[in-house]
Image (cartoon, rainbow, N blue to C red):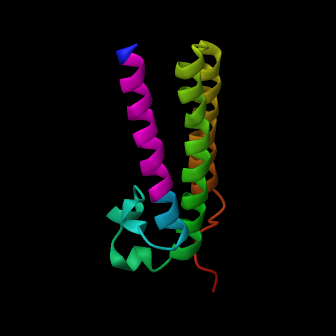
């Protein structure tokens, strides 16, 4: 029982962090938290629409937080199927994000 409470608290903490990061990104701030973008040179960053990129990533943080709720419900209701549902949803969202961001030059500035 004690292990379940610890797991619930850890997952809840991660969800809260994702929500805080989502709020930060939706407000157009926190671009330095985006992997890859923070490693670009200033000249390379000038080619990207930072506001669009941060808003997209902020929305994705909320969606990822939602998928992690399944993990909490899995522990609370002792239903492993909910954990696997949340995990598959989480992984599908991450794959979608990677494909969406890296194809079609969606976040490059339009001239």
Residue at image x 55%, y 35%? Answer: 68
Residue plotted at (64% across, 81% down): 110
What predominant SS class does the magenta segment belong to? helix
Q: Is residue 54 above or below residue 35?
A: below
Residue 14 is drawn in which quadrant?
A: top left
Where does residue 83 sit, x and y in percent of width and height? 58, 21
81 vs 4, nearest the viewer: 4
* Front residue (pair 83, 109): 83
Q: Residue at x 44, y 72 (%)?
A: 29
**Is residue 110 toward the left or the right of residue 33 in the image?**
right
Q: Quadrant of the C terminus?
A: bottom right
Name the image quarter holding the N terminus.
top left
Q: Position of residue 41 (x, y in %)?
A: 33, 72
**Magenta-colored span:** 3-20
The verdict on residue 4 being magenta is: yes
Q: Is residue 48 visible?
A: no
Q: Quadrant of residue 37?
A: bottom left
Q: Is residue 36 visible?
A: yes
């Amino acid at each position: 029982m004690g292990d379940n409470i610890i797991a619930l608290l850890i997952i809840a903490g991660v969800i809260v962090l994702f929500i805080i990061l989502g709020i930060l990104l939706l407000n157009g701030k926190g671009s330095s938290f985006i992997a890859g973008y923070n490693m670009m040179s200033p000249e390379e960053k000038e080619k990207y629409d930072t506001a669009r990129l941060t808003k997209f990533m902020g929305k994705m943080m909320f969606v990822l937080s939602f998928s992690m709720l399944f993990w909490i419900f899995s522990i609370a209701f002792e239903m492993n199927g909910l954990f696997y549902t949340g995990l598959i949803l989480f992984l599908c969202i991450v794959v979608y994000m990677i494909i969406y961001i890296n194809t079609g030059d969606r976040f490059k500035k339009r001239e």
